Amino acid sequence: MIPKDMNYQMPAEWHPHKCTFISWPVRKSMIYPENYKNICRGYAAIIETIAGYEPVKVIINPTDKEEVQSFLSSELLWQRQIELLCIEHNDAWLRDNGPTFVINDQGKLAGINWRFNAWGGKYAPWDLDDQVAPAILKHLGLKCFDAPLVLEGGSIHVDGEGTLLTTEQCLLNPNRNRGLTKKDIEKILGDYLNIEKVIWLRNGLYGDETDGHIDNIACFAAPGKILLQICDDPTDENYNITRENLAILKQEYDAAGRKPEIITVKLPPPMDFRGRRLTLSYLNFYLVNGGLILPVFGGEASTTDKQAIEIIKQVFPRRQIRPIDGMAIISEGGNVHCITQQMPVGIGGENNAKS
């Protein structure tokens, strides 16, 4: 049976979390392996910040255990607010190759195991990464649904009430699911996530090597409310991209028949690292229990940082907004939302919660 037939549904990110999963970086898979220790320090800062709100389970390669422990708070490890879980992996973007947790009408948890091919075959090998999701679900003792679709978690956002956001650039890319039509993909998403309406934006941010993940360009702030990155500079490649997405959203309705309220957030100015434009986004934030971890970028982005913080505070008045250094790990291609995967509160998973 498929998840929909068993009344499973993907909850919104603001559903209370049982914990957060994160994979530790793997030096040999990095774009800049010589920067490994700096990236590890960036990961450690994010992990420890999240651990102030909810438990964090860090996926590590078995040979890295002592080194990982050296970067993390011994107190948080001792308190088991941070736990290490040995699962072999090729790369560190758990949002994309980890399980998508679903919950049914009785509160029982399960997980979706999507097919993973390293963003359209860009970064070989990915054989271990394709097995991370089922390994996590087996560890937790949760039912695993194997979905017939190549999909990364960063390519979708849901409102928990039947609506999903994505981009054509990613899910319709022939390097993912060649031969599948938009209608085919919508059917699979409906079957496995129990959503009723897909809102298709056209493209993600310029230069995003994920082929336009939605979690850098737009997200739900609540049912009927969408945050959208916008570019005001007509000379920037993101100007036409973000304006087209805004025009699309203005014509859309969600699964409940609502015309979404659209709240725009100005993109930070372009920044490069060693000649490559970085994919900077304020919407790559991560919701935690009672808080929101917001990447900010400093320097030339100081003005847009302040603007983003104020907008996010207004949109999420009941959450503590925790700005973090968004430059800490972005040189490797992603930020805080890209490295995290929430496990919602529900029935199941407790018996194997210990690493």
Image (tube, rainbow, N blue to C red):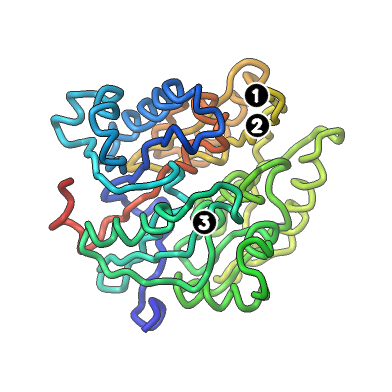
Q: Amino acid at mark 2?
A: Leu
Give how far apart the Cα atoms at labels 2 and 1 are. Answer: 7 Å
The 10 Å Cα crowd at callout 2, few under 14, some 14 to 19, many 20 or more, is many
Tell which circle, 2 or 3, labels the residue nearer the N-terminal end.
3
In terms of depth relative to the viewer, which is nearer, 163 or 138?
Answer: 138
Identify the disc placed on residue 352. none
Q: Quickly name the residue at label 2.
A: 278
Quarter of the picture containing the N terminus is bottom left
Q: Secondary structure at mark 2?
A: loop
The reply to whether dot 2 and dot 1 touch (C-beta < 8 Å) is yes
Tally the numbered discs: 3
Q: Which residue is mark 1?
A: 273
Question: Is 269 or 177 nearer to us in this picture?
Answer: 177
Dot 1 falls on a residue whose secondary structure is strand
Q: Point out which mark residue 152 bears.
A: 3
Give the amino acid type for the residue marked by disc 1 in the picture.
Answer: Phe
The amino acid type found where label 3 is placed reads: Glu
Q: Which of the marked residues, 3 or 1, is nearer the chain's N terminus? A: 3
* Residue occupying the point 50% across, 29% down: 329
